[in-house]
Image: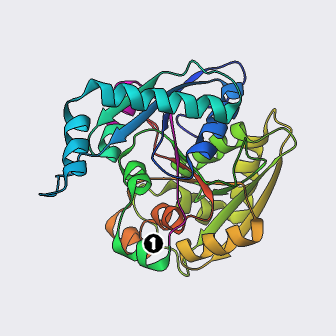
Amino acid sequence: MVRKVRHLFRPGSTFNLLLAIENDDNARAAIRVTDALTSRGAVPTVIHATELMTPVAGTPNSMMFFAEAALGEEFHEGLARSLGALISSTTGRAQTWPVLSLSGEPALCITQEAAGRNADLLVMGIHQHGAFEQAIGENTATRVMARATVPVLGVRPALSGLPRRIMVATDFGNASREAAHVAANLAEPGGSVVLVHVSLPSFIVEEGDEGEALIQREGIEHAFLHLTDEISEGKSIQVETVSRTGDAGAELMAAAALVSPDLIAIASQRHHLITRLLLGSVSRKLVREGSWSMLITPPAKGG
């Protein structure tokens, strides 16, 4: 059984949501999804972090921007007002969501605020990147997802409300089973959750790898049946299953192309050395590719 499951998206419960807005084209999509999540109990707070760049000598505009961002309360107050206006125009009505404008490295500010405010969920926009951008390194979303201790919902423009078709990557371990529970709670009544398991060409079972141990004891189909029963109990959702073999990142991307989900949910967890060398960071690969909205769930405290 799952040792501890977050209470996100459950009827009759509320949760603290931190919406991180960047200066990008995905801001409105993230705002619309946040607005839709209020019907699932979300209580939003909004944050924007302005990174202070060292000004280039001889460029007065950058010097002025640096001084205003670093020293001026008016800068942050004005930005907060602008964000409030953007939120109201996007949702079509005035909102009372608190808006914070901070100075600092965005990923660090966002994760620190999430921890300090006991946020239960982070929402932010994610971009689709080309091959070169994927190869050279990180962006704010991937840095936040690597650091955050709470689930992160990365929103692509195609997701304008609550998802109806969610793909869940599962290895049947406790972390990914929790991700499946959270996804099932989020799915609209009448919607679907597609459970996808990718097997390595040969089993490598490490100490504490409860998912692979379960598969070896009971088989993949039996593990699928157990998880399907768990997440569908009391819900009017359809659960589908997909099994693939090969490189986890490549096979999950291939599965997503066939499933066409509104959202992919995947657990973020630390792997032992051998597994990490074989799999790499699967969730990071999917986020960098950027074709789908993503829900990244780190292990729950005490889980």
Q: Position of residue 135 (x, y in %)?
A: 39, 76
Viewer-nearest residue: 240 or 85:
85
**Compared to 280, does 80 lie above or below?**
above
Asked if residue 282 is positioned above or below residue 229 in the image, the reply reads below
Q: Quadrant of residue 68?
A: top left
Q: How many marks are shown on the rendered structure?
A: 1
Q: Rate crowding at label 1 as few (under 14), some (14 to 19) or many (20 or more) other CA atoms within 10 Å.
A: some
Q: Is residue 221 above or below residue 71?
A: below
Q: Residue at x 80, y 58 (%)?
A: 240
Q: Which residue is mark 1?
A: 279
Q: Is residue 112 magenta?
A: yes
Picture residue at 71% right of the left edge, 71% below the top: 257
User: In this view of the protein, which residue sits in the foreground, 106 or 268?
Assistant: 106
Q: Secondary structure at mark 1?
A: helix
Q: Looking at the rendering, which quadrant does residue 231 occupy?
A: top right
| Residues shaded magenta | 111-129
Picture coordinates of residue 69, whole percent (x, y): 26, 37
Asked whether residue 6 appears in the rendered view, the answer is no
Residue lying at 80% horizontally and 39% vertically, measured from the top left:
188
Tag 1: amino acid: Leu
Judge by depth and name the residue closer to the eye, 218 or 121: 121
Question: Could you tell whether 197 is left or right of 237 in the image?
Answer: left
